[in-house]
Image: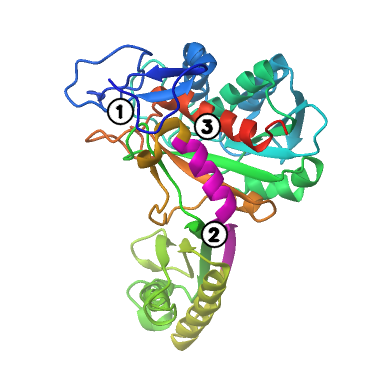
Amino acid sequence: MSQLAGAPQGRGWAVIERLDICDPVASAIAVGKTSRCKREEPAMPIIDRIAQFHDDLTSWRRDIHAHPELGFEEQRTSDLVAAKLNEFGCEVHREIGKTGVVGRLRVGNSPRSVGLRADMDALPIQEANTFEHRSRNDGRMHACGHDGHTTMLLGAARYLAETRDFDGTIHFIFQPAEEGLGGAEAMVREGMLDNFPCDAIFGMHNAPGLAVGKFAIRAGPMMAGSAFFDIAIVGRGAHGARPEAGIDPVIVGTHITAALQTIVSRNVKPVDTAVVSVTRFHAGDAYNVIPEQALIGGTVRAFDNETLALIQRNMGRIASGVAGGLGASAEVNFRVVALPLINDPTETTFIADAASELVGRDNVDRESALVMASEDFSYMLNHSPGAYIRIGNGDQAGARQVHNPGYDFNDAILPLGASLFARLAERKLAHS
């Protein structure tokens, strides 16, 4: 199997031969071994030293996967991260954004600095997998790959602490509560980027459906900003057989739900992209009672803050207007949970070039499609220039997407992600 076109050859690099995974859930790929599957994927040159401790990375990742913790509850995970960073020889700073951890590694006298970020939290999902490292915490699961992201950054920290081939300061940022709870905002609010300044900051997320050995990124807006909303409707309760005696909040809620769809179709410019989705509707407890109140809720996505604000204004207008017209009242609670993720053009080129050195230019998509999902790393990018890249987790038919109870992170890509994190730091802080 040949190396990727344009990939560096020679000292300091190892080649992983990675063939198609027959089992969609399987994730362990041995270095230097081949599979009996039919379809081949290109080889990946990675940093030789990181390839040597691939087994350690796999062990760490599976341990984290087996012990998932929800946002702001990542005590065991942050203990593990802090212990590893301390073992590597990094300064360790804890309880930033409650359970966040920052490791600092200084070499030389340069004032330059770079930040490398990974998220640590799991999701409130009951895992359906049956492999040995499945979740041991009922109703909690690493269904988005944050176990892998944390491990890749730990792998980069271990390598960089051993080799120390840079001049400046690296901040290894392990963020809690990415899944809609505002962990990045909490770290920024508590002064993380003031106390650990970063000339540039980089993040990475696995991408099921993207082949192993490929990366995807785009300059400017890449991932949508998101908001959650709740609309509390107050009517007047009555007997179900006497609707004329009440004001039915269920009817009011259905009309509000339908009218909210006009925000995107009639208020947002057609050239812009936005989503308004009602995902919850709660009202009543009995078959023969018209309830007093109803509650609807959902999510909003857009690629700029102005569109999010426009949606918020029109949501308030529609909810109060429709409710008032039907004799009820409605109150909107609209809260932004992630800003639009906007990649700095210069740093996008920088990280894409570094990825190209690992896998070849043809395997880095620099004009990736917009992603409607959100990522609160955007709060860090709002304060420091940087970029966020997607790393292929495998494109096998039938493989599970993130936030699915059958998902698992692909351990084969751990050395590749760690290598990219490491090369970003070494190149950004190269000896003058």
**Mark 3 or mark 1, which is nearer the start of the sequence?**
1
Which of the 4 image quarters holds residue 211?
top left
Q: Nearer the viewer, residue 347 or 136?
A: 347
Please tell me how crowded label 1 is: few (under 14), some (14-19), or many (20+) other residues with Cα within 10 Å.
many
Q: Nearer the viewer, residue 22 or 210?
A: 210
Which range of residues does the magenta coloring cover?
333-356
**Residue 395 as seen in the image, left or right of residue 345:** left
Q: Magenta stretch containing residue 53, yes or no?
A: no
- Residue 39, can we see it? yes
Disc 1 and disc 2: Cα gap in Å? Answer: 33 Å
On the image, numbered disc 3 is attached to which residue? Answer: 420
Task: Name the spot of residue 60 as percent of width and height, x first.
Answer: 53, 18
On the image, numbered disc 1 is attached to which residue? Answer: 42
- Residue 141, can we see it? no
- Badge nearest the viewer, 1 or 2: 1
**Mark 2 or mark 1, which is nearer the start of the sequence?**
1
On the image, numbered disc 2 is attached to which residue? Answer: 340
Task: Name the spot of residue 347 as percent of width and height, x first.
Answer: 58, 48
Disc 1 and disc 3: Cα gap in Å? Answer: 17 Å
* Residue kind at label 3, given as amino acid type: Leu
**Residue 24 as seen in the image, left or right of residue 249:** left
Please tell me how crowded label 3 is: few (under 14), some (14-19), or many (20+) other residues with Cα within 10 Å.
many
Q: Secondary structure at mark 2?
A: loop
